[in-house]
């Protein structure tokens, strides 16, 4: 006699959230201001403006550009603004800082804009492993947003989870 196999995970009513699904579209490219500095120390306005005009900005088409300076130099704020103006027709996003901080800011924005009403009174599993780099701060932000509305939060895979939060019966 054969037994019917039942997928208990599929019928459990758990909602899985994969943070990697919110990973920014497009490659993350870097733009270092260091090569545009005089002696890698000083930003000369006239030279910098000319360099920005002649730079091939099309190489950032569809990418997320992080702008920083690897030299220990004082960079005026307007220099970052000028880069933003020149790259605007090409890049998906432009961010002052490094790739790690860009990802943190990106996930913070996505999670703060997330419609959490669909998770109200639900049992949620936040998927653990991913093929893309998801910063730990994204898990913290998502938990902070979900905590007030969900029945429970678990971490991992639906078949093997770590309990994070369970609403008390009196809540």
Image (cartoon, helix red, strand yellow):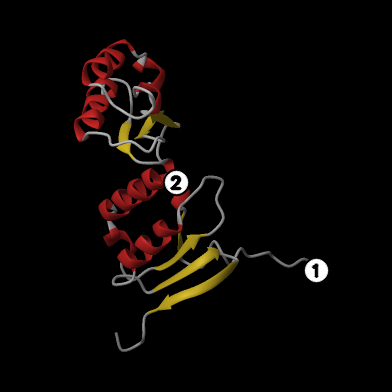
Q: Is residue 164 left or right of residue 143?
A: right
Indicate which disc residue 1 carries. 1
Mark 1 residue element: loop
Q: Nearer the viewer, residue 80 or 90?
A: 80
Q: Is residue 170 left or right of residue 156?
A: left
Q: Residue at x 40, y 39 (%)?
A: 24
Q: In the picture, residue 39 is in which quadrant? A: top left
Q: Residue 131 in the image: state x and y as whole percent.
A: 56, 46
Please rate how many residues cluster around mark 1, counting C-alpha atoms within 10 Å: few if below 14, some from 14 to 19, many from 20. Answer: few
Indicate which disc residue 21 carries. 2
| Chain-order first, disc 2 or disc 1 | 1
Q: Residue at x 37, y 68 (%)?
A: 122
Q: Nearer the viewer, residue 42 or 20?
A: 42
Q: In the picture, residue 86 is in which quadrant? A: top left
Q: Residue at x 25, y 31 (%)?
A: 80
Where 61 sits versus 72, above or below?
Answer: above
Q: Residue at x 31, y 89 (%)?
A: 170
Q: CA distance from mark 2 to mark 1?
A: 42 Å
Residue 79 visible in the picture: yes
Q: In the picture, residue 75 is in which quadrant? A: top left
Mark 2 residue element: helix
């Amino acid at each position: 006699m054969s037994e019917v196999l039942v997928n208990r995970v599929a019928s459990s009513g758990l909602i899985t959230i994969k943070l990697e699904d919110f990973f920014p579209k497009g490659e993350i490219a870097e733009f270092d201001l260091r090569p545009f500095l005089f002696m890698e120390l000083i930003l000369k306005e006239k030279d910098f403006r000319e360099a920005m005009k002649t730079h091939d900005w099309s190489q950032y088409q569809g990418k997320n550009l992080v702008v920083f300076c690897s030299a220990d130099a004082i960079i005026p704020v307007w220099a970052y603004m000028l880069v933003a103006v020149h790259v605007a027709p090409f890049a998906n996003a432009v961010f002052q800082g490094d790739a790690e901080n860009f990802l943190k800011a990106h996930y913070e924005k996505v999670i703060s804009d997330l419609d959490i009403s669909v998770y109200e009174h639900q049992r949620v599993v936040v998927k653990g492993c991913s093929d893309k780099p998801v910063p730990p701060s994204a898990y913290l932000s998502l938990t902070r947003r979900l905590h007030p509305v969900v029945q429970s939060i678990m971490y991992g895979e639906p078949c093997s989870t770590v309990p994070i939060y369970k609403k008390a019966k009196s809540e």
